[in-house]
Image (cartoon, rainbow, N blue to C red):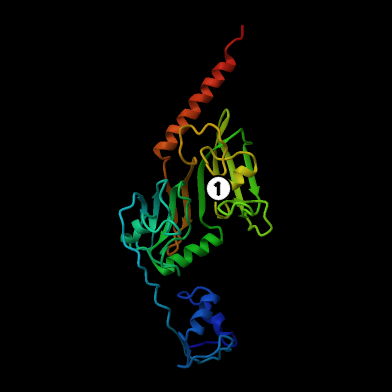
Amino acid sequence: MVIGPDEQGRRLDAVVGGLEPVGSRAEAQRLIESGRVLVDGVVVAKRHLMAAGERLEVRPAPPPLSELVPESVPMTVRYEDEHLLVVDKPAGVVTHPSAGHAGGTLVHGLLAHAIAGGADPTRPGIVHRLDRDTSGLLVVARSERAHRRLQRMLRDRLIERHYTVLVHGRTPPALTVDRPIGRDRKVRTRQAIDVVDGREAVTHLRLLEPLGRVSLLEARLETGRTHQIRVHLESVGHPVVGDRVYGRREETLGLDRQFLHAARLAFPHPETDEPIEVLSPLPHDLQLALARARRQADEHAAGERRPRR
């Protein structure tokens, strides 16, 4: 491109960072430092002030090579186009490779769907994640551009993420939990709210159905910290039913995992801006647990109504 009046006098890294294929000043600086940005055919410093008429050439870095091999992994594709996928992940499947999970992840199952985007070759296309034992919807990119735009939308809170969750206790009709979350100081595999380096975390909760000793809620994420919904619900005295890390050793309604399901995703399409809404029904194990909870609530209510002798 040829520098015009609008770019004249601006720093090189600011101009390059504003280009759609680059997307950020940090990425621009990496490209400049690696010699992939030329001004009139010459590598210059990132603080170089642009002059009108200079010719700017940017050579994007090649995508990172991945050694991952496609595998057959259970999942359902709920939405698909040339730019992205929305996938319904079952419980028990890890989102991407990590320590102790070198294979069998959602990423391995999605490699055949041409996912792409992001700097980490072990998690191509991944925009956000779900815990292993949380089921439901994830959006996954198919290009570097879609990945960058979806991540920006996530930061700007333009992607609506709604969960269905069953918790212990009777909750108020609506509740917002605004408590920073960080790694637990004593148990490093847990997250906690009472930490000095916690990051902002906001969860909005709405009561869907009171069921005696448990409550069915809708949880909407404003931020997306690790274990956020589970930590926030524990912090207000309503841990998730079946949660073996943040829950109680109480009635689990037959579940061997937490009752937490990513039921709805809504966002503007990163290329067309058209609204996308994808829904996921409750999985069978959660349907059975909910039926048990309703039956127990009905039996308890009937006992309360029965006249005493």
Residue at x 43%, y 56% (from the top left corner): 100
Residue at x 62%, y 37% (from the top left corner): 173
Q: In front: 305, or 106?
A: 106
Give the residue pinned by disc 1: 220
Residue 79, placed above or below residue 281: below
Position of the N terminus, as image quadrant, is: bottom left
Q: In front: 34, or 82?
A: 34
Pinpoint residue 160: horizontal percent, then vertical percent: 52, 52
Neighbour class for label 1 at 10 Å: few (<14), some, many (≥20)? many
Pinpoint residue 199: horizontal percent, then vertical percent: 63, 58
Pinpoint residue 227: horizontal percent, then vertical percent: 55, 50
> Furthest residue to the top?
309
Position of the C terminus, as image quadrant, is: top right
Q: In front: 188, or 147?
A: 188
Residue 12, picture quadrant? bottom right
Q: Amino acid at mark 1?
A: Arg
Residue 211, picture quadrant? top right
